[in-house]
Each structure stands twice: as C-alpha cells, then as structure tokens.
Amino acid sequence: MTQIAEPEIDANPGLPGRRASSSLGDFPSPTPWPALVTLVAGDAILALVLWDVPGILRTVSVLGYLSVAPGLACARLIRIPDGLSRFVVGVALSLALGVLVAQGMIHLHLWTPLLGIATLTVIASLVALIELGRDVLHHRRRR
C-alpha cells in the first residue's frame, strides 16, 4: 500500500525543526517576567505618587507607565506575535483606557488624578494576573 506524505510547513526557515502552529494562542509565553514587571511597576508608580516624590521623577515615570503598561498588558493577553505591532497596539490601548477612565470619573463626578492612576494600575495588574494564571494553567496541562 502506498502512503502519501504531507509536506511539513516550516514556520522559520532559518531554524530547523520548528513547525508552524495552528493558531496564535497555541504558543505559551516563554517567561512570566513581563507580567511580573507590570505588577511591580504598578506598585512602584503608586508609591511614587503617594510619597510625593520630586516632580520630574514622578512626572516622567507616571506618564511613561500610564502610556504603555495598561495597554501593553492587554496586548500581551491577546498574544500578538510581532513585537512592534504589540507595542503599537499596547500604546494605543493605554491611551484609549486612559481616556475611558477619565471620562468615567468625570461622569461620576469623582475626578481625582490619584483615582485615575490607581484605576489604570488596577486594570494593568488584573490583566497581568490573568496572564500569569493562564500561563500556570497552560504549564500544568502540558505536564
């Protein structure tokens, strides 16, 4: 009897032995460090704001965190394979989340900068915890 062999599709021509995965959600995160950095950075940002650190250090770190971290955590949860695309989507999501949180606080008559920073930090931390939990469950299933 004759068997027909199907050719393997090589996802990375330069790396032998690696196949293309069937979907983007199949590959696990190689390390949990981005989610852990998000959790630690959120706590550090809240500490900088609450302890009233000198202006320039607080301004640069808070604006940098708020313009990248919440959206990048969500983009990692989506698992976009390209690094530049993930970063661009993360920054866009961060800015959109910042506007949504600000609009929500205005409509609820609860506008305070500390509440906005805390809300965005909680969003980023929850998404990072979801990512860590998903990686732990995926690791247990592989065993």
Image (cartoon, rainbow, N blue to C red):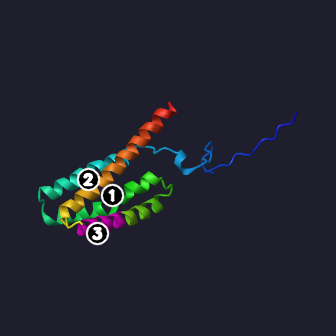
Q: Is residue 108 above or below residue 11?
A: below
Instruction: Say whether disc 2 or disc 3 marks the residue closer to the N-terminus.
Output: 2
Asked which secondary structure carries label 1, the reply is helix
User: Bounds of the magenta span?
Assistant: 94-107
Q: Residue at x 23, y 60 (%)?
A: 117
Towards the viewer: 62 or 128: 128
Task: Check if residue 116 falls in the magenta segment.
Answer: no
Asked which secondary structure carries label 2, the reply is helix
- Could you say where residue 91 lies in the image, as x and y percent from the top left? 38, 64
Quick one: label 1, few (<14), some, or many (20+) residues within 10 Å? many
Mark 2 lies on residue: 42
What distance separates the C-alpha of mark 1 from that of mark 3? 19 Å
Task: Check if residue 99 falls in the magenta segment.
Answer: yes
Mark 3 lies on residue: 103
What distance separates the C-alpha of mark 2 from that of mark 3? 21 Å
Q: Is residue 13 above or below residue 117?
A: above
